[in-house]
Amino acid sequence: MQIILLGTGNPMPDPDRAGPATLVRVAGRDLLFDAGRGVLMRLAAAGSSPVGLAGVWLTHLHSDHTTDLNDVVTMRWAMGMVPLPLPVTGPPGTARFVERTLAMLADDIGYRLAHHDDLTWEPACPVTEVSDGVVFDDGELRISAAPTDHAPVRPTVGYRVEAEGRSVVIAGDTVPCVGLDRLCAGADVYVQTVVNRALIEAIPVPRLQDVLDYHSSVEDAADTAARAGVGTLVLTHLVPAPAPGTEQAWVTQAAARFAGEIVVGADLTSITV
Ligand SMILES: [Zn+2]
């Protein structure tokens, strides 16, 4: 099982960090979790493409996690030699979100259908909405979801992927909660979006202070990892983005509370378990 951080940034535009997105490559499949800014550029760098995805799993509908879903939809359709519906799974509200995304793309879909004689079908995105429980299980690959807490964004979910005797949790944005603990129990890898509380508290901007109450801090993520007995804690969606060379300070913060391996994500960081 390979986990590739496609985007480790936060909503602030950053030349070095794309928006939140994580690729899990397992059992011969490429699974995309969230689709933030620049996801297709990073997906190409990871040796994948929108045509090669088994599907997209959204943790929640915040714009930084979904803004380039439309690009995935368009390019899977436009690059596909045959109709390739894109399965999209997400919390309740995802069907409406995908419907609106397709509506936004309606003009472009019309232009391309008019221009390419061999393109005779429209993009399709079958949606599965999930709150809790097993989302997918074919005996080889199992994906389950559990509710997380990112209020006032509701509902939100995290995912656990299990295959080849390995497991990874893609938590999305959440504070520590029962659902997250359940997902993480005994996982090999736990990928958590985090904020750095000490750094943010030093910046007196109310809109930045607001992010503290609905994300896991580095310490929160370390505590969740320790409680759940995970093997590796991966920090992503770093707020604020660490200045180059300061990543080790984030590791030190987490290591004070979690004895396992700690990875501070950069775009295209790859973890193999
Ligand atoms: Zn969010």
Image (cartoon, rainbow, N blue to C red):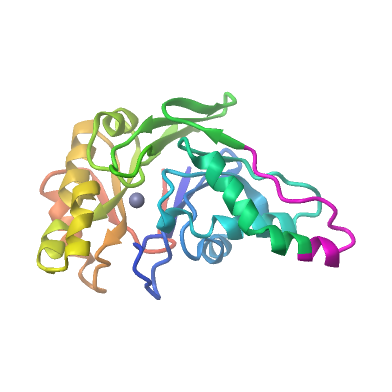
Magenta stretch containing residue 121, yes or no? yes
45 shown above or below 211: below
Q: Between residues 203 and 137, which one lies in front from this camera angle?
A: 203
Q: Between residues 100 and 176, which one lies in front from this camera angle?
A: 100
Residue at 54 percent across and 65 percent down: it is 45
How many marks on residues? 0
192 shown above or below 131: below
Q: Between residues 233 and 35, which one lies in front from this camera angle?
A: 35
Residue at 24 percent across and 65 percent down: it is 240
Relative image position of residue 42 (x, y in whole percent): 51, 64
Side of 33 where 218 appears, left or right: left
Residue at 59 percent across and 37 percent down: it is 127
Side of 157 where 251 appears, left or right: left
What segment is highlighted magenta in the picture? 111-126
Relative image position of residue 194 (x, y in whole percent): 26, 53
| Residue 117, visible in the rendered structure | yes
Relative image position of residue 12 (x, y in whole percent): 34, 68
Q: Quadrant of residue 165?
A: top left
Magenta stretch containing residue 250, yes or no? no
Q: Residue furthest right?
A: 117
| Residue 20, visible in the rendered structure | no
Q: Quadrant of residue 73?
A: bottom right
Q: Which quadrant is the C terminus positioned in?
A: top left
Residue at 55 percent across and 66 percent down: it is 41
Kindly report the secondary structure that dominates the magenta region of the rendered protein.
loop
Relative image position of residue 142 (x, y in whole percent): 51, 29
